[in-house]
Structure formats: structure tokens, C-alpha cells
Image (spheres, rainbow, N blue to C red):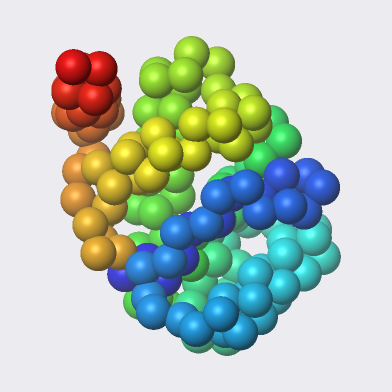
Amino acid sequence: MIHYFYLINKQQKIRFRKYYTPYDDEEKRVLETQTLKTIVNRNRDHTHFIEDKNNKLIVRRYAGLYFIIAIDGNDNEMAYNEIIHLFVECLDDYFGTVCELDLVYCFYKLYIIIDELFLAGEIQETSRSVIMNRVRQLDELSEQ
């Protein structure tokens, strides 16, 4: 199960966050601080997988953004590593060449895409064409 999903830029600013486990505000602040410290202090030559106290962090970097998913310790890391890549492909498909400004100003589209990928912290859909068809259908409905 996914506990949380973060998008962090190189300046260590969280650009997107989604929690699938209920945390209070103080716990969220502590998690964000710990995650940022872990990512910043990590040697880039190491893997995309980081063992944390209670869970595993899956980290992928695309251009100037870090995509981070925290999962249970017994979940398959490679599946979530690939799901991050699928998420980035969906973003590229929707925005053209996605950049940080797209994510900041169209954050609601991020939530739509991520809600098509995950349901209650579990992987829901793995087909990019199905996800993008649903997102385009929602766009058509919102334009009417």
C-alpha cells in the first residue's frame, strides 16, 4: 500500500503531495522533513529504493523533479518504480513536455491523473491508454 506520494523540486520544495494513510498535521510535517533529509543526504550512485523506519521510499528523478512514493516494507519495489515511470509518461502525454510550472498551475490535473492510477493507496490501473482516455473524457465533460 502507498502511504504518501511527493513531488519535490531540486530546491527541496514539495510541489505535490498526496496521502493515502491518515496523518495529523504534525505527523505530515515530520514525514516531509524526514523525507527531504533522506533524499538530500542520499548518494545519487545508490538505488532508487531507500529503507525507512516503517516503510520503503521509492525515488525517481526526472529533470528537476524527484518523484517519491512511500510503500509498505513488504510491497514490490519494482512495481512502484515502474508506476512512477507510468505516471511521468501520462504527464508527458497530457501536457506535452511536462515542466514544473505545469504541475504548479494545473495541480488539479495531477490529482485527476493520480486518482486514475491509484485507488485508496493501491495500484488501480496500469494501462496508459486507458488512463489517458479517462482523463480526456473528464476534460470533455468539464468543457461542456
Placement of 5 over or under 73, stated as above or below:
above
Q: Is residue 125 in view?
A: yes
Residue 108 left/right relative to 67: left
Name the residue nearer the viewer: 14 or 130.
14
Name the residue nearer the viewer: 39 or 95.
95
Placement of 61 over or under 89, stated as above or below:
below
Q: Quadrant of the C terminus?
A: top left
Q: Position of residue 10 (x, y in %)?
A: 78, 44
Residue under the image location 45 percent in, 59 percent down:
18
Q: Outermost residue, top direction?
A: 96
Residue 86 left/right relative to 14: left
Name the residue nearer the viewer: 100 or 87.
100
Q: Is residue 129 in view?
A: no
Q: Position of residue 138 (x, y in %)?
A: 21, 27
Q: Position of residue 62 (x, y in %)?
A: 63, 35
Q: Position of residue 139 (x, y in %)?
A: 26, 22
